[in-house]
Amino acid sequence: MGAYQVVVTDYDFQNVDIERNIMAEYGIEFIPAQCRTEEEVIRAAKKADGILNQYAPITADVIEQLENCQVIARYGVGVNTIDVETATKKGIIISNVTDYCLDEVSDHTLALLLALARKIVVLNQSVKNGKWDVKKAKPVFRLKGRVLGLVGFGNIPQTLAVKAQSLGLKVMAYDPFVPSSIADALGVKLVRLEELLQTSDFVSVHLPLNRETKGIISRQAFELMKKEAFIINTARGPVIDESALIRALSEKQIAGAALDVVEKEPIDPNSPLLNMEEVILTPHAAWYSEEAEFELKRKSAQNIVDVLNGCYPDYMVNPSVKSRLRLSKKERKR
């Protein structure tokens, strides 16, 4: 394969031993970094043949200065850290891992939904504060028959829909890119976003972050929601207009929120969300399990190895780049 170089722009894992070992099998030089800015990424990865990326910005300016890069692999599903359009124009493959945490995120979302519905966090804190009083939870409504609205209907929310239906929830979804045949097969009704917001008792966000989705859950969206409705976000923070959310919560336009992601991470220590009893917060943890982390790291590294070995990766964000490349289709193991 030759003496290729792969740079990890940043990571918040305990180590990158899995990736290092995979690269070592192919004689690839492996260089971990902890970049936070464009300038740091350029210095670290300017001459890299492949890049592993978590949160560091891979902007158009960064990509234009990459001299040898053939592939940028993202740890995760979303690729909002990467300027995919510029990379495609430059003939660089962008890869992600679309299937590593379907159960983890759907389970986490369902856990947040149940905690909101049964007021678990509120009651827990009340008891710890010395108050043994069920009235602290009022009102609580029976879950069976309530409506879960999924904003986005990709792999994760499709997995969630099945689990939610087993609890007696009715499920509807908004996603203009998913054919009705998929929704029909899962017993899910596809609707317009406005209808979903007006009808749902729980609104769960599952959209990628891009120009079209940023701030899509806006002040107008909250005005459409029921006063007893809850919103859950395990996707990307900026999909929800956070100032509009805080206003909606403050003015009791909605009943509460559960957020695994926020606009700026880590959350601002002065954020009003931290002092709102009706808000549950987790630290971008929905994806995590030991099994999911192992799978993510292995598949992300393998995507890079495949490309440097002259093959298209299993997970490819920008297939249109193929017109500029002459790679082979990867042989499947029998």
Image (spheres, grey):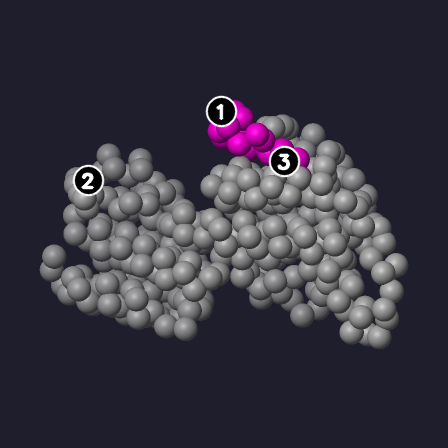
* Residue at point 52%, 52% (across, down): 105
Span highlighted in magenta in the image: 169-188
The image quadrant where one finds the N terminus is bottom left
SS for callout 1: helix
Give the camera-side residue of 257 and 141.
141
Pointer 2 residue: 329
Which residue is the extreme one toward the left? 2
Please state which amino acid type lies under the numbered disc 1: Ser
Pointer 1 residue: 181
**Residue 44's spot in the image, x, y percent?**
32, 67
The image quadrant where one finds the C terminus is top left
Pointer 3 residue: 171
| Left or right: where 118 falls relative to 68 | right
| Left or right: where 9 falls relative to 287 | left
SS for callout 2: loop
Which of the two labelled residues, at mark 2 and mark 1, occupies the earlier sequence position? 1
**Residue 8's spot in the image, x, y percent?**
33, 65
Give the CA separation, mark 2 to mark 3: 39 Å
**Residue 297's spot in the image, x, y percent?**
35, 60
